[in-house]
Image: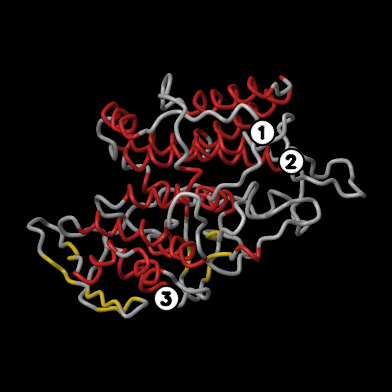
Amino acid sequence: MRNGGSDSTGNSDGGSGRLVRRLRKHRTLALGVTAVVLAGAVGIPLVVADSGDDESCWQLPASARALADDPVAATKALDPGGDVTRLTAARELLAHGKVCGDGARVLGRVVEGATRSSGPGEPHTVAQAGSAYAVAAALHDRELPAGLAPAVARMMAEYVVDAGRAGSLGRDDDAIGPAVAPEEIQPDGRGYVSLGRFLAPGEAHATFEYTDDLAGADADMEFLVAELAQDPEAFAILYDAERAYLAYYLERLTDQGGDPAFRASPDQREGSSGATTWPDNDLEDLADRVGDLMKYRARYARDGTIPDLAAFDASVRSHTRGAFRPAPERLDIRPPMGDIARRPVSGPVRGDLMDGRHQLFTVVDGWAQDRNVPAQRASAMKQLMDDSYVRALWLR
């Protein structure tokens, strides 16, 4: 159970609920011959080509291929706008179950170019964050073509804070658009920011939890993670991002495991939010996401989606960058999201990589030892994460 704190709107922290975890059976896409015009007047004709087997594939045209080498144009092409009226362009470009030749990998370069920041230390712009939302929404309930998954996973890692928040919230009726500009992100009187803790100044955030039923806009991150987890490289990218985020998060907490930005209100009542309330919630959610990855791995091994689990695990390990250890002292710098997932490793992974609980606890134990965190507090944090991990792995 989560702590009984409430957010700045007065809703309980469980009020928005979580999406029920699910795996949907993939539907074969019916491809037709049509044409669309992407933002910036980039024409993308849809061409059905015979791939030589039972299923036709979509031929990536030269105009779309050119976007892979032009990040500015790619962002302009995929940006759905604040009212998501241009979301159709992203769908027509990305929503294809089978793409001819190297087309899926080229589309992956388009996705990365459109959504990633301009370089290390650079925050995301509103257009880049909106483009990330458009990618997730365009792939909603879709089977990804072979070769696209690693790039989509890298995009999610680039927005590790936002993707994690959306996976915890599900649909959020309070979200007013696909992205939030930096100037719209302000803490309340308690230091609480609904988008998360330790946000970089000047960075826009993708609100993957935003939905627009009239536009058919729904960036279902739960489904997308389930789809990506079938690919060992994508699995490794998501797993690395979560473990890197844990190290980043812990090294910004106080020595008591609390949020340094928390400010108690004068009329603080018993049972209301405290300095550890939102860190506890965030750590539960992170453990939940790692548990989800392991749940999908087990399910795919049972149903034959992963035909050789040992080979899958070996491939995941080969794509894993390493282990992540928090800094030995508290940090107060706020790097942008793209830098979180790209943080340097502290060394190779030790022990069973697929024992997610062990890998998470190793990070917490190293942090607690370096920072002299009270044993009772460190134990409580690990117990919360353990409960959430097990629930995700077994009970959903």
Which type of secondary structure does the marked residue at label 1 adopt? loop
| Residue contact between numbered discs 1 and 2, judged by CB atoms under 8 Å | yes
Q: Which residue is mark 2?
A: 260
Gap between marks 1 and 2 measured at Cα: 10 Å
The answer to whether 362 is drawn above or below residue 129 in the figure is above
Q: Which residue ends up furthest to the right in the rendered image?
A: 267
| Residue contact between numbered discs 3 and 2, judged by CB atoms under 8 Å | no
Residue type pointed to by label 1: Arg
Looking at the image, tell me whether mark 1 or mark 3 is earlier in sequence order: 3
Q: Which mark is residue 330?
A: 1
Q: Which residue is found at the position 52% from the left and 27% from the top?
A: 357
The answer to whether 248 is drawn above or below residue 80 in the figure is above
Q: Which residue is mark 3?
A: 86
The count of marks equals: 3
Gap between marks 3 and 2 measured at Cα: 40 Å
Looking at the image, tell me whether mark 3 or mark 2 is earlier in sequence order: 3
Gap between marks 1 and 3 measured at Cα: 43 Å
Q: Which residue is found at the position 62% from the left and 51% from the top?
A: 199
